[in-house]
Image: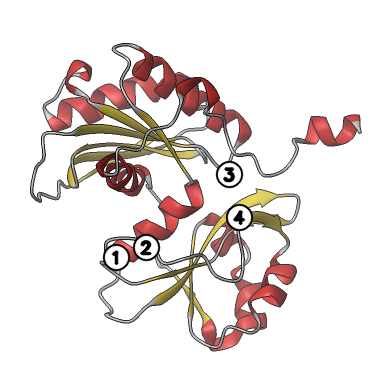
């Protein structure tokens, strides 16, 4: 297992400590925030599964942030789309932690968080078309398309494509009418970069990042929702798989 510790980003603190968990792909991440201030973020890759390492990674992120689990006020968790097993493990862990003390929990779209993480890397004043793209296997990707103003307080409405599972060629067909650059990010974008480059030409812009920790971005999205007094109902919060599992498909 490989672990990466990310530098802290200090902003105005609010006294709202958030623990954010992402296990939507084989590369997981944990982040601790005080409001919109990122205190620590850890990303890791595991071949043995998230259940073997998740608690230890949470403890490491808390230690780096110099906080204890009792100091956490709310939890954010990526709910998909992504790895079915990974999503279940991350959500079950977040629910268990939130249940103690009846603390708020917020489920965050993995694709939205991935798009948000790219937005934070860019410094253009103009709006951007961001295409977060997660490898869904079976020759498909999980994808959505967002039009986002960098460093604005919120996302603009989704354009062209809501969250779905789709083949790379079908995705290119759906994006053909967008004339501006399309900023792709995610392991699905890397997996099918040749198809996207051939079909979309100069409009296809691939993020150079090869590891995509989204826990920090998910935590920031959760904080914005908490500011609006939003929270999810723990018992009703479920993973967003988008499509059926292989076992479910074979059973039909």
Asked whether the residues under the numbered discs 2 and 1 touch, taking CB atoms below 8 Å apart as contact, a structural biologist would say: yes
Asked whether the residues under the numbered discs 3 and 1 touch, taking CB atoms below 8 Å apart as contact, a structural biologist would say: no
Mark before the other along the chain sequence, 4 or 2: 2
Number of callouts: 4
Residue 118 numbered mark, or none: 2
User: How dense is the environment of label 1, judged by Cα within 10 Å: few (below 14), some, or many (20 and up)?
Assistant: few
Front disc: 4 or 2: 4
Kindly identify which residue carries mark 1: 121
Q: CA distance from mark 4 to mark 1?
A: 22 Å
Q: Judging from the image, what secondary structure is the residue with disc 4 in?
A: loop
The residue depicted at 38 percent of the width and 14 percent of the height is 99
Vertical comparison of 58 with 208: above or below:
above
Name the quarter where the C terminus is drawn.
top right
Image coordinates of residue 156 in percent, x first then y, are 41, 67
User: How dense is the environment of label 3, judged by Cα within 10 Å: few (below 14), some, or many (20 and up)?
Assistant: many
Kindly identify which residue carries mark 3: 81
Q: Judging from the image, what secondary structure is the residue with disc 3 in?
A: loop
Name the quarter where the N terminus is drawn.
top left
User: How dense is the environment of label 2, judged by Cα within 10 Å: few (below 14), some, or many (20 and up)?
Assistant: many
Asked whether the residues under the numbered discs 2 and 3 touch, taking CB atoms below 8 Å apart as contact, a structural biologist would say: no
Mark before the other along the chain sequence, 3 or 1: 3
The residue depicted at 15 percent of the width and 32 percent of the height is 65
Kindly identify which residue carries mark 4: 163
Q: Judging from the image, what secondary structure is the residue with disc 1 in?
A: helix
Q: Extreme right residue here? A: 252
The residue depicted at 67 percent of the width and 81 percent of the height is 199
Query: Nearest the camera: 171 or 63?
Result: 171
Vertical comparison of 99 with 30: above or below:
above
Vertical comparison of 252 with 156: above or below:
above
Q: CA distance from mark 2 to mark 3?
A: 18 Å
Quadrant in the picture for residue 122: bottom left
User: How dense is the environment of label 4, judged by Cα within 10 Å: few (below 14), some, or many (20 and up)?
Assistant: some
């Amino acid at each position: 297992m490989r672990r990466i510790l990310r530098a802290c980003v200090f902003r105005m603190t609010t006294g709202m400590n958030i623990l954010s968990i992402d296990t939507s792909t084989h590369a997981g991440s944990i982040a601790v925030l005080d409001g919109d201030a990122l205190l620590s973020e850890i990303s890791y890759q595991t071949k043995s599964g998230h259940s073997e390492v998740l608690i230890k990674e949470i403890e490491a992120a808390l230690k780096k942030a110099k906080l204890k689990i009792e100091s956490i006020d709310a939890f954010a968790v990526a709910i998909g789309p992504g790895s079915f097993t990974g999503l279940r493990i991350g959500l079950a862990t977040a629910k268990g932690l939130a249940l103690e003390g009846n603390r708020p929990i917020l489920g965050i779209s993995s694709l939205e968080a991935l798009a948000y993480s790219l937005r934070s890397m860019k410094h253009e004043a103009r709006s951007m078309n961001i295409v977060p793209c997660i490898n869904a296997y079976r020759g498909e990707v999980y994808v959505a398309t967002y039009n986002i103003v960098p460093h604005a307080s919120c996302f603009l409405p989704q354009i062209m494509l809501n969250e779905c599972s789709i083949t790379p060629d079908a995705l290119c067909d759906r994006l053909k009418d967008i004339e501006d650059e399309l900023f792709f990010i995610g392991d699905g974008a890397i997996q099918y970069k040749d198809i996207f480059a051939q079909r979309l030409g100069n409009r296809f812009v691939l993020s150079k990042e090869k590891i995509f920790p989204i826990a920090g971005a998910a935590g920031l999205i959760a904080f914005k929702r908490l500011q609006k007094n939003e929270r999810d109902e723990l018992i009703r919060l479920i993973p967003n798989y988008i499509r059926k599992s292989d076992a479910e498909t074979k059973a039909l």
